[in-house]
Amino acid sequence: MSALTLATWNVNSLRQRLDGLARLVEEKSPDVLCLQETKVRDEEFPAEEIKAMGFTHQVIIGQKSYNGVAVLSRRPFKAVGERRAWWGKDDCRHASVELDGGLEIHNFYAPSGGPTPDPEKNEKFAHKLGFYDEMAQWAADRKNDDRAMILVGDLNIAPWENDVWNHKKLLRSVGHTPTETERFQQLLASGALTDVGRRFVSEDKPLYSWWGYRFAQSFEKDYGWRLDHVLANAAGNAAIAGYEVFRDTRTWEKPSDHVPVIVKVA
């Protein structure tokens, strides 16, 4: 497996974030980009603009206005995974590729879950829990695969106490409820996956990747959540030599509310 830099970023509308993407590419030189919330139909995807940035190999799974994922690479794909409808909905939440050398990359955009953490009253929350249950089974089915696998994306759960700016205050908020954090831990256990962020940054230290738009000073006051993750199986984790949350992008013009998470694969 050859060395590469992999970045995952919820761009929250790709066409609004092209300048920021170009700047990220210039400053961090990623070899592979995994994007979420592209919010663009495949036929309207800015493929040529992204090819001009050096990413000539592209897997695009998108729809109008919502969701959407893409894997963009300077290097050719050995294989592209089949499109999958998760939890009965083909709503553009997963793309996967295999690179030469055997590294498998899975890019996910998990459901946010709506406003209320009650699956009886909130269909979106029920969908989120079901999506995670299916992910856990998928991970369990792959647990004994020796190939290096890295799973990235906006997983819409902040699983640990210091993954949110105020743990006690946010325990009843969607994204940090005990029901959800248990699902996240179940995913890790089912697939024997490592939370790479917390491998590099200990659990007693704050670590965030998202600062909401609703409160204008959320970034300045560091009212953050860690929703964007890199998970890896044993072989994938062994290959990861560096990890960074690139907070600078939140200060750029027309920022996404999420920032990129970048890993170095040795």
Image (cartoon, rainbow, N blue to C red):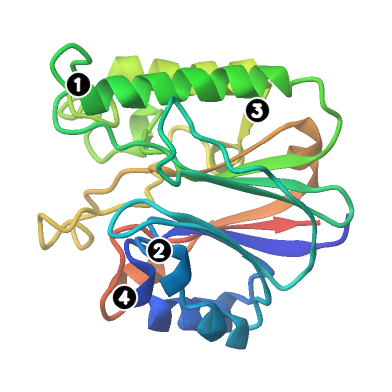
Position in image of residue 211 (x %, y %):
26, 54
Position in image of residue 123 (x %, y %):
21, 23
Left or right: residue 177 compared with residue 141: left
Residue ID at (29%, 32%): 175
Q: Is residue 11 above or below residue 52?
A: above
Q: Are marks 2 and 3 in contact (CB under 8 Å)?
A: no
Seen from the viewer's position, the closer of residues 38 and 245 is 38
Q: Residue furthest bottom?
A: 52
Q: Earlier in the sequence, mark 1 or mark 2?
A: 2
Marking on residue 16: 4
Under circle 2, the secondary element is loop
Q: Nearer the viewer, mark 4 or mark 1?
A: 4
Q: Earlier in the sequence, mark 2 or mark 4?
A: 4
Q: Are marks 4 and 1 in contact (CB under 8 Å)?
A: no
Q: Is residue 143 above or below residue 30?
A: above
Report the residue marked by disc 2.
Answer: 41
Q: Earlier in the sequence, mark 4 or mark 3?
A: 4
Residue ID at (14%, 25%): 116
Q: Earlier in the sequence, mark 1 or mark 3?
A: 1
Q: Residue furthest top?
A: 120
Neighbours of disc 2 within 10 Å: few (<14), some (14-19), many (20+): some
Which amino acid type is shown beneath numbered disc 4?
A: Gln
Seen from the viewer's position, the closer of residues 81 and 187 is 81
Q: Nearer the viewer, mark 2 or mark 3?
A: 2
Report the residue marked by disc 3.
Answer: 193
Report the residue marked by disc 1.
Answer: 117
Q: Residue furthest left?
A: 215
Q: Determine the image quadrant of residue 176.
A: top left
Q: Nearer the viewer, mark 1 or mark 3?
A: 1
Position in image of residue 132 (x %, y %):
45, 23
Under circle 1, the secondary element is loop
Which amino acid type is shown beneath numbered disc 1?
A: Pro
